[in-house]
Amino acid sequence: DICSGELCGEWETEEAKIGRAGEGSQHPFGAMNIVRTPSVAQIGISVELLDSLAQQTPVGNAAVSSVDSFTQFTQKMLDNFYNFASSFAVSQAQMTPSPSDMFIPANVVLK
């Protein structure tokens, strides 16, 4: 977690809440029948001085984007929206009838 530009150790507490054995029913996804396998994640962070970054050689084949920043932002926003919306995807067989809900087929969003 980054709090006001400083690193905080609060995420370890959150990880412990989610990862405690035997408390799956308290977790929002605990009711799902998911086989939990232990996993390890590792992240590397490099802290560099601005002066040393300025002296590094830029990538030779890097090209400046010809797309304006608003178009880039819009494209990234739509990509993230699609990824978020598709995370709720279910098959037609899994859908429960609900006349008050409106469903949009994913293939329509892709167009």
Image: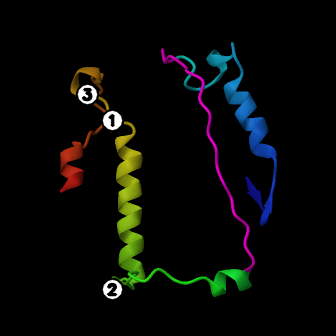
Q: Vertically, is 38 above or below 78?
A: above
Amino acid bearing label 3: Ser
Q: Look at mark 3 in the image and give the residue it sits on.
A: 91
Percent of width and height locating residue 69 = 42, 81
Work out which quarter of the rendered image holds the C terminus and state it.
bottom left
The coloring applied to the image is rainbow
Callouts 2 and 1 close, C-beta under 8 Å: no
Q: Position of residue 78 (x, y in %)?
A: 36, 61
The answer to which quarter of the image holds residue 51 is bottom right
Name the kind of residue labelled 1 in the image: Ala
Residue 60 falls left or right of residue 100 = right
Marks 2 and 1 sit apart, C-alpha to C-alpha, by 35 Å
Q: Nearer the viewer, mark 2 or mark 1?
A: 2
Query: For the residue marked with disc 2, what is the amino acid?
Result: Ser
Magenta-drawn segment: 32-49
Seen from the viewer's position, the closer of residues 10 and 105 is: 10
Mark 2 to mark 3: distance in Å?
A: 40 Å
Marks 3 and 1: CB-CB under 8 Å? yes
Say if the magenta span includes residue 74: no
Q: In percent of the image, x 74 and y 43: which residue is there?
A: 11
Q: Residue at x 40, y 65 (%)?
A: 76
The residue under label 1 is: 89
Label 2 sits on residue = 66
